[in-house]
Image (cartoon, rainbow, N blue to C red):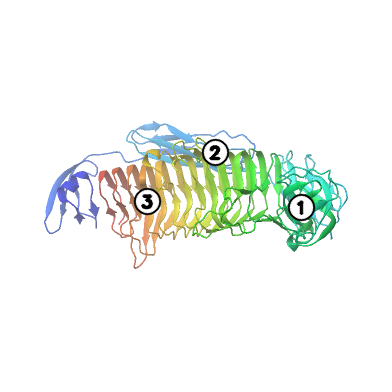
Amino acid sequence: MIKFKKKLALLLTGALILGIMPSLAYTTQYTGSYDYSVTSATNFSKRMNYVKKDWTAPVISLNGSSYISILVGASYVDAGATAYDSVSGRVTVTATNTVNTRVAGKYVVKYTASDAAGNIAYAYRTVEVKAPAVTQPVVTQPSAPTYPTTSTTNSTSASISTSTTASTSTAGQSSTLATSTADATMKKVYLSSFSNISGSLKEFTGSIGAGSSVLTLSTSAHDFKVGHGIAIKSAGNNKETNYWLITTVKAVDGNKLTLSTNASTSASGVMVLHDDTKAVNSAISSGNAIYYFDIPQMNIKGLSLKSNAIYDGMGKAVLNLPVIYSSAPWVQSMVSAEDQTNITFRNFTLDGGKTRGVYANDQVGVSLLLVLDSTKIKVQNNTFRNNGYISINLQSKVNDILIENNTILNTDIGIMAMPEWLGNLYLENAVFQNNYMDGGTSEGISIVSGMRENPGYAKNITIHKNVIKNKLANGIQYGSRTSNIVISENDISKCNNGISSIDPNLEKRDNMTSTNADIIKNKVYNNKWSNFVLDGTDVYVANNEISDGNNVLVLGRLFIDNVTVDSNKFINTSIALSPAIHIYNLKNGNIKNNVFVIGSTNNFNAAIGTENGNVVSLSLTGNDLGGMRILDLYKVTTLALLDQKY
């Protein structure tokens, strides 16, 4: 039976609803005319011409293997592909190649070919760029810390080496290192190196009374200034820092320094440091491993990472921030790399101290890690937790960044790239992979671009094999000026939306210039509103498992063109209020070879439907509808139905 909302008038626009499969009498399979009839309160019959059209896409053949593995730094020249079409013959293949041999990760080379009828085919090659094997440093700690009188080293401080030798040692501690060729010229900064505030390595002695904020140094010939960090042995009350008091200098008067924090206990003739590396390492060697920013309101920036260095927390160093009051500046950072290059930051824990304000989604807090105007950055194997703002914040101009194997718990946004706030800025060549995110507010991964008058852009982005769940906004969101993005093999659940390419409250249709988005092999399920909300041009959605949500897949909430939805599995075990594939504004779309699975008692409203928009050309081919109603379509100019399975 075929039902028409407006009988003939609606028929002529090509918009219709199919309930069960109608009886069609074709004069031939593809060309000529056919009769159809409608059974309703008023019988209706008509003959329509059916014009033959080529719906078969070209076949693309890769030159070489579909999977290639190379080492970081090796050259890569793509072997290309060829394509043949049954009607047009040999056709041109266009390759989109985002492989960055300087950053480890999995990259996808996308091949596109189209025939004279406009049918489009895609093929893919995976190129994995692997880092050389690196053996983690083996550190043997002494049974108890000792403190020398010199200012150049400490028996419990970690080794810092700028040479290319494979082993280093200091008194009381040895570190055996196996480094890769890529790491050999980089400075090794193990456990922690937090000398950023003043850069001084000088040591002093001093005395302070319990409850006092005035430290008396043994000499006036010191180099402390207002705002400098300072670490005072035995003046704190926290055993996790081995009773070091770590704070900042508020005022200087000769040999008397006024601190931002009162001493908890009296200390006389004790070590006073600019560089709190030794304080942290002292705590670590005693079995403790926590560094506290002892500043109630974070009015200074935290730890600054410098170029050409590996910062390794060894899985022990924990940077902890106490509760920040609602008046604190939320744009500050606990750790930052600003205008730097060639940095690895790994094996740390950064704890924001549950820096949440009194409002439900108050962004009071700090960025745990800020990367600003920097290149060649690796963020690996860290834990970020308990923060009211962003865990990893990428701002301004950021290029060549790898963020992998991190755990992000109970924070606002897990990874956020903001190349657009100041206009004409960018994020390029980024890989976010194998990260685990659970809980907190806002997005798991958010790329903000294209929302303002002078928007920045993001391109060559890979988001691969992340687990994201229990976020109050999107699991993954990318903005309207994002191009060449691959989102693959992620597991996203229990967020507001799973994967979204827009924020319809901020973005406009005129800005929808995102292109070349490949969303493949993801598992997206049990999200509150929509599992997918996609806009842009040249969007390929394939081999995903998508289940249970109000809308399972939304296309063209603002505008989408040249979208292919291929070989996905749509599963519904709970009641859905909208069609599985919900279309708004679409220019050209091809929905093919998808499988729809429903539970024993619940249904999608329909498999595929349109609403409140305009669909120019839509092709539905070879979909397995699992026994449900096939279509709920409205305002479709050109519709092609081929080989559906009911």
Disc with the residue nearer the chain's start (1 vs 2): 1
The image quadrant where one finds the C terminus is bottom left
- Give the residue number, with chain letter if any, for mark 2: 428
Residues packed near mark 1 inside 10 Å, few (<14), some (14 to 19) or many (20 plus):
many
* Number of disc labels: 3
Name the residue nearer the viewer: 539 or 264. Answer: 264
- Write down the quadrant of residue 21 in the picture: bottom left
Question: Which is more toward the observer, 534 or 233?
Answer: 233
CB atoms of marks 1 and 2 within 8 Å: no
Which percent across, then down, holds residue 178? 75, 46
Does residue 530 appear to the left or right of 166 in the view shown?
left
State whether residue 67 appears in this view: no
User: Is residue 177 visible to us here?
Assistant: yes
* Residue type pointed to by label 2: Glu
> Residue lying furthest right in this view?
149
Residue 509 picture location, percent across and down: 37, 41
Give residue 393's position: percent from left, percent from top: 57, 47
Tell me the tag on residue 54: none
Q: Is residue 152 left or right of residue 372?
A: right
Cα separation, mark 1 vs mark 3, equals 55 Å
Report how far apart the C-alphas of labels 1 and 2 lie in the structure: 39 Å
Front position among marks 1 and 2: 1
Judging by the rendered image, the residue that carries numbered circle 3 is: 554
- C-alpha separation, residue under disc 3 versus residue under disc 2: 27 Å
In the rendered view, tell whether residue 575 sits above or below residue 105.
below
Determine whether the residue tagged by mark 3 lies in a helix, strand or loop: strand
Along the viewing direction, whichever of 301 and 505 lies nearer the viewer: 301
Residue type at numbered disc 1: Ala
Give the residue pinned by disc 1.
231
